[in-house]
Amino acid sequence: MVLTNPCYERKLILLSFAIILLYLSPLFVLGENAHIRVHDNLDSNIAWYKVLINSGELFGDINAAIPQVINGLPRNALASEFSGIVWLYALFPTMIAYGLSQAITRLVAFWGMYILLKKHFLQNNEWALIRVGAALAFALTPFWPSGMLSTLGMPLALWAFLNIRNGERSWKNIAVLILLPFYSSFVLGFFFFLTGMALLWLWDGISRKGWNFRFLISIALMTLMFLLVEYRLVASFLFTTEPNSRDEYFHARLPLWRVIRLTFKNFILGHTHVMTVHGLFILPVILMALFLIFYRKIWRQEKTFLFLFTLNFVLSAWYAFWFYKGWLPLTQRFHVLDTFNFARFHFLRPLVIYLGFAIALRILWQEKVFSKGMVIAILCLQLVILGMFNDEIIYHKKPSVKEFYATEQFHEIKEFIGLPPETYRVASIGIHPAIAQYNGFYTLDTYNNFYPLSYKYKFRKIIAQELAKNKTIKEYFDEWGGRCYLFTDELGKHYMFKKNSKAKLSNLQLDMTAFKDLEGGYIFSSIPILNAAENQLVLERTFISEKSAWKIYLYRVMEA
């Protein structure tokens, strides 16, 4: 029978690799003309890697600072020198590094999910189609790019842990646990995964009345590796006494009815940083399997599926309830509940959802509700919809990488100013400061979750009058502040005004004394400031380029 032929499974695997490479091909074929995610990507991480590499502080000590950003961004605010993604950007041009990172992540995601299913969940040869199909679908999910293997590496880690838990002794398991921390993030995925493994170990000990110390040591080993790789994060958390911007992150503000709505929204639609694209096909399949289990009273045989379904919903509820205003008394008493985002336990959901999907297909096929053709159809439909989430499709109306960073245009601006970039500071209006940073300018504004609170207060003076006019941006800046931007009442929380925009600023009120106190000399604005003179600004020149998404109005601060 073809379904039990190992050659058939190998062909499916090779086809999957080909599909993954085809999915990635626009990144390598188009290069800088490719369209990729802006949010938490072009507007931040990609520029951060370039700033870090050019700073000379890649190996700086834990007290080092990067003068290009906010007159001295703590070195610890950026990635560890032991992070693999940093070295990709150090060794290769931006888009080659980006494409290679995508390839590493998706190929490891596929292989990890495939061997996890084959070894621990769908062992029989007859389920080869489901194993490969579910693994391929998992690998094509639109994950957050700089997250690396923080979520998509979880299946591989679970494979290794379950092997160790079952008493298997192999160097491969240890290698996985040692190497994964070099290409993933502790706080953006594996803290929550390792907490789950610790709870599994505890459950084993209580329920089996025995303690698997090899399993416990393996959990400790991977945790230790993360702490070593991310030693800068550990040092900042344990030894830094200066208040930072995370100290004013307040999350507990939602009423109960919004929390309940958010629970179901997350359960059905997912979250931008861990997109699973499961609502259209995967969720109905899972719900059909759930109904069938109870209809045919086979819940004892399908305990794993029921556990995964329950965990999936609990994780969505936990995510939503983390923002419930009822937490406020606890967050006021225990500050770590504000500074650390425990809502991210929901980052486990891609693993949970796609495991549940594979098992649900097996149940429906095994119980003769689905035929082989229906399983193939469902897998193909899921792959098609995931294909529609390819960056080149979903972001084709956004600026390309080349248009976004506009290196030629900003080089022209740098040449026009004619001063060494380190001798003056700039800030941006209507565009992300990451663009100026990427092009080597020293910026007073930034997007970063960890910078001195004292600087936030100094910067706030510049935009205080604008914040007073607009409750939304005031709350956004004061109760989070990760985007330390020149916010304006007229533009609100919008930071990308392309060169065809008709927007204008008519009532801008900036404190230019505070701006000059921080050594500010120029403002890059993507829209005209009609009352520039009232803000002690002089329009020096307007820069426009066919290769750029922006029309940049260069404003110089008047001398006192």
Image (spheres, helix red, strand yellow):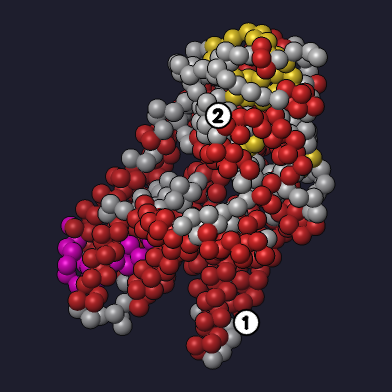
Q: Identify whether 152 is placed above or below 326.
A: above
Q: Position of residue 470 (x, y in %)?
A: 55, 34
Q: Which of the 4 image quarters holds residue 524?
A: top right
- Helix, strand or loop for the magenta stretch, by majority: helix
Which-is-in-front pick, marks 2 and 1? 2
Q: Secondary structure at mark 2?
A: loop
Q: Residue at x 55, y 25 (%)?
A: 430
Distance (Cα) linking label 2 and label 1: 58 Å
Three-letter amino acid code at the position of disc 2: Asp
Indicate the secondary structure of the residue bearing disc 1: helix
Instruction: Name the spot of residue 509 as percent of width and height, x first.
Output: 64, 23
Residue 190 can be seen, yes or no: no
Residue 181: percent from the left, percent from the top?
62, 57
- Using the image, determine if residue 204 lies above or below residue 273: below
- Dot 2 crowding, Cα within 10 Å, few <14, some 14–19, many 20+: many
User: Which residues, given as a range, are shown in magenta?
Assistant: 351-373
Residue visible at 24% across and 77% down in the picture: 294
Q: Amino acid at mark 1?
A: Phe
Task: Name the image quarter holding residue 368.
Answer: bottom left
Residue 492 is tagged as: none
In the picture of the structure, the residue carrying the numbered disc 2 is 489
Point 24% across, 54% down: residue:
378
Q: Nearer the viewer, residue 557 or 553?
A: 557
Query: Which quadrant of the rendered structure holds the N terminus?
Result: bottom left
Depth check, front residue: 303 or 536: 536
Relative side of 550 to 485, left or right: left
Residue visible at 79% across and 54% down in the picture: 240
Q: Which residue is mark 1?
A: 213
